[in-house]
Each structure stands twice: as structure tokens, then as C-alpha cells.
Amino acid sequence: MKITRLTTFRVPPRWMFLKIETDEGITGWGEPVIEGRARTVEAAVHELSEYLVGQDPRSINDLWQVMYRGGFYRGGPILMSAIAGIDQALWDILGKSMNRPVYALLGGRLRDRMKTYCWVGGDRPGEIVEGIHRARAMGFDTVKMNGTEEFARVESHAAVDRALEKFALIRSTFGNTVDFGIDFHGRVSLPMAKVLLRELEPLRPLFVEEPVLAEHCEQYAKLAEHTAIPLAAGERMFSRPEFKRVFEAGGISILQPDVSHAGGITECVRIAAMAEAYDVALAPHCPLGPVALAACLQVDLVSHNAVFQEQSMGIHYNQGAELLDYVSNPEDFRVKDGFVAASEKPGLGVEIDEERVVAASRNAPDWRNPVWRHADGSVAEW
Ligand SMILES: [Mg+2]
């Protein structure tokens, strides 16, 4: 079997799909994207296609190494996202060629269904209670929300109280019948992270994500000494060498590699195994589309330490398209009692409605995250 063509489709809300075709008529799909830089990743995918066209798509390990090592420079969000989406499509082809799900080719699944959660409250957290009611109606019992809006390096007590109010409201409204994670989103400085973690602890969040920016990962161990709340991070780390530093520094309880950013299924299965050796749980990041989610589920189903799977149903970014708009088998992604069941379909288990993808790609918007500023005019972390 030989790869004949790679075609990319940028589509609303902020995703990109990759179709890899072969001379035997088997087609694989991937989702190579970094949110807000889809065109840059798209260019990287097409540059990497020089290594792929004419090759056997089933030689995934070799092709992965060629893409990773063959260009001398490596790593980072753009190159690793391009490799990630290509890798997903290659696994999809391999699975379809053998009429087996990808997880079966990775040694078989070790769980029947995967715990999943959704977002509530948007970029500027509000309407949390309504959001949780909506999430429950969709089958979720676990949610995540942003911790703060713009947050100064040293912030006022009023801003701290504003951040805490909504979490207290969740507990007073729902008691212990809902679990919630809190994403600090890298908006919070080290000293304020210590304050917020201390104040949040009585409200018992499931975890706090990116308590400080990933580039300050050596601080996670110090923060972990201050709090019993599990700390999570990983969406802005892209390869084993980066994750290695986090494991060595310590402090992270839940690792969140993104299977569309960190080298795909091939690399994320290895990252998951590294995490397991450090007794760190796995919760793949996925505020993306259906191919990315299907790829994450393959990793979850073969990783003993996988605890939660993020997914984008109802997320505030999904303007113009929803998670399952481009798939013909939405029933395979339904959430029941907080879980999504393992699919028996071959490959990634996602059936793409190609006509819909092609039509949507004609007017794809260039999504960008907002550029926020503090009260004094300086740029704030979003
Ligand atoms: Mg996050």
C-alpha cells in the first residue's frame, strides 16, 4: 500500500482535518491543528508530505521518526501538531486495512468506557450553574471551567473573592453531586496561585489545571507542597523530552498531553507510559474536533492511568460548528452517566461526512484567541 495524497480542510469553528489517501482506496483522517495557528500547521503538514507520498502508510514507527528526526529541527507546537494529525491518519489507515480498532492494534483495550467531561462558563466565567444544568442534560457529571479572567501578578482581595464566588455557588447549589476541575489557564502568577489554591481547597475541586504557565513547570512541585488539590498540566508540552522535565521536577498529579499537539497516538501512548511510571494520571486535553477526540479515546482505552477525557461538546469556542457536526456516526460519541463507550469500529472509529467537511472548508474563519490587556494597558495572559 502506498500513500498517494494528503489533503487538508480548515473548517469552523477552529479545526483542521487531514485526509490521507492510498492507492488501495483506504483513506485515513487526522486532525493536525494548533488553535489559532491552523494555517501554519497546514503549511507544515504539506512540507512533511514529501516524506510520505509513495511510502507504505502502515510503517508508522518509521515514518514518525522520519518526520521527527529527518528535519534536524524538532519539537514545538507547530511541527508536533503536524506530525500528530498525520500520525492519527496513519493509524486510521492501519486499523481500517486490518478491520480492527486502533486500540486492538495497540494490544487491546483495558477498559470498556472512558470517563469524560465538558466545559462550562466560557472565557469569562459566568452562568456556571446554568451551564452545569445543561451539561447534566447532555449526560455529564463532571465539568471544567476557567478560574479567573485577567489576573494581575499581585491581585486585589476583591478579584480573589470574585474568582472564588462561583465555586462556592457550585457547592451550595449542587452539593457533592457534581465534580469540577478549574483551569487557571496560565493566567495566574506563582504568588497568586498559592493564595487561590489555599482558598479553593475547602471547595474541593477535582483538580487545578495550569496553576502557573507550563514554562514555569519547575514551580509545580512547590505549589503541590502547598495544596492537597491535584495539579494538572500538559496541553502546552509537545514531546517526551518536555514531559520528562515535568516528571523529574514533580508536582503534577494529572498529565494532559493533547493527542493533536504532542506527536499523535504514537507519542502520546509513550507519554502515557512515562506518566504511569511516575504514578501520574492521564487526562488528554481535547477542546478540538471529532477526529482528535477519537484519537484521544484510542490512547485512553490502552492506558491504565487514564482518568478523564476532555471533549468540546458545548464548549464556548464551538461557534459555527459543534463536535459531532462532521461525523456520520454521532451515536458512537454519546455520553451516558459521564462515560463514552469504546467503539468497535475499525481505525479511529470516526466516520467523516466528507461532503460536509468540503462545504464547510470553503468559508472557514481564521479563529484567533482574544488578546487581553490588564487595567494598566499591558498584555494579559489569556
Ligand atoms: Mg487548559
Image (cartoon, rainbow, N blue to C red):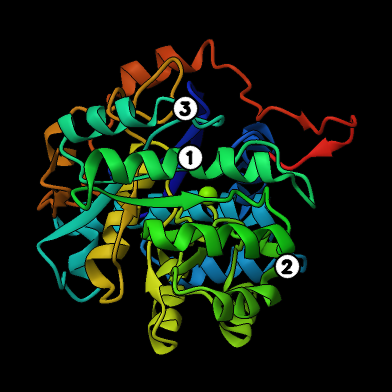
* One can see residue 235 in this view: yes
Q: How far apart are marks 2 and 1 (CA)?
A: 27 Å
Residue appearing at x 63%, y 61% in the figure: 195
Residue 225, located in which quarter of the rendered image?
Answer: bottom right
Task: Judge by depth and name the residue closer to the eye, 230 or 95.
Answer: 230
Q: In this view, does 315 lie above or below 146?
A: above
- Please name the amino acid that badge 2 sits on: His
- Return the residue at label 2: 216
Judge from the rendering whether residue 357 lies leftward or rightward of residue 124; answer left or right.
left
Q: How far apart are marks 2 and 3 (CA)?
A: 28 Å
Mark whose residue sits in front, 2 or 3: 3
- Return the residue at label 1: 165
Residue 271 in percent (x, y) is at 46, 74
- Please name the amino acid that badge 3 sits on: Gly
* One can see residue 54 in this view: no
Mark whose residue sits in front, 3 or 1: 1
* The C terminus lies in quadrant: top right
**Mark 1 residue element:** helix
Q: In this view, does 53 lie above or below 269?
A: above
Residue appearing at x 62%, y 66% in the figure: 68
